[in-house]
Each structure stands twice: as C-alpha cells, then as structure tokens.
Amino acid sequence: MKDREDDISSNYLQHGGAGRQPLVVRITDSDFQGEVLEKLGRLEAKMDMLIGSGQPGRMKLAEDRLVILEKSEIRRSVYDRIVNAAITMAISAAIALHIFLLRSGTISK
C-alpha cells in the first residue's frame, strides 16, 4: 500500500515546499454508509409525503385540484364564448338597425 501511495504522489507535481498533501479525503465505510442511510431515510419520508402511503399524498391532492380547475376553466370558457357571441350579435344588430333607423328617420321627415 505504501508503494502505491508513493507511485500516486510521484505522478503529481508538488507545488513549493508544502510537502505531501492528501489528494482525496478518506471517509471510513461505516461513516459513509451511515450518511447514505440517513439521506435515504429522509428521501423515503419525503416520497411518502408526496405520493402518500395508503392515503392520498400531496401529488394526488394536487392532481385532483388541477382536474377541478380544468373543468371549471372549460365551463367558464363556454360561458365566455356565449357572452361574447351575444355581445357581438347585439353590436351587429345595433349597427344594422342604426343604419336602418337613420334611413327611415330621413324618409319620414
């Protein structure tokens, strides 16, 4: 192992007289495994909160709200189209009758 470390350190230039510095910080396997398991546990808890375990999670609730909003948006879109059509017809009728009324008004005078 000592020979391998010497080979690795001889392949890299050492700047100045600082001496040997470790290239990689070594963590013992048990510390690393502990960190990984802790993070995995937190990830699992967050996934359970999002997806839900046996009950609706946040994602299901958000999807349900989105479906309700889409339905109301479609309904509102239909109402908006009906109202816009009625307004357009009223304006067109007013323009058409306005021209008719002006002509009939000048004839009657």
Image: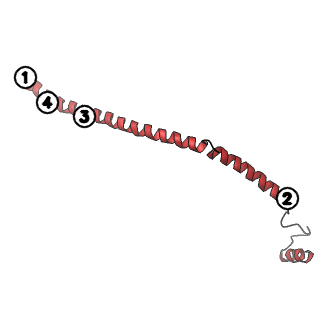
Q: Earlier in the sequence, mark 2 or mark 4?
A: 2
- Residue at point 81% right, 58% down? 33
Identify the residue under disc 1.
108
Query: Seen in the image, is 27 located left or right of residue 76?
Result: right
State the residue in front, 84 or 55. Answer: 55
Could you tell me how far apart the alpha carbons at marks 2 and 4 are, in whole angstroms?
Answer: 93 Å
Q: Work out whether 67 lies above or below 38.
A: above
Q: Count every numbered label the image shows and give the total.
A: 4
Q: Secondary structure at mark 2?
A: helix
Q: Amino acid at mark 4?
A: Phe
Query: Seen in the image, is 75 located left or right of residue 24?
Result: left
Q: Work out whether 33 lies above or below 53.
A: below
Identify the residue under disc 2.
30
- Residue at point 25% right, 34% down? 89
Position in image of residue 41 (x %, y %)? 74, 50
Q: Secondary structure at mark 4?
A: helix
Identify the residue under disc 4.
100
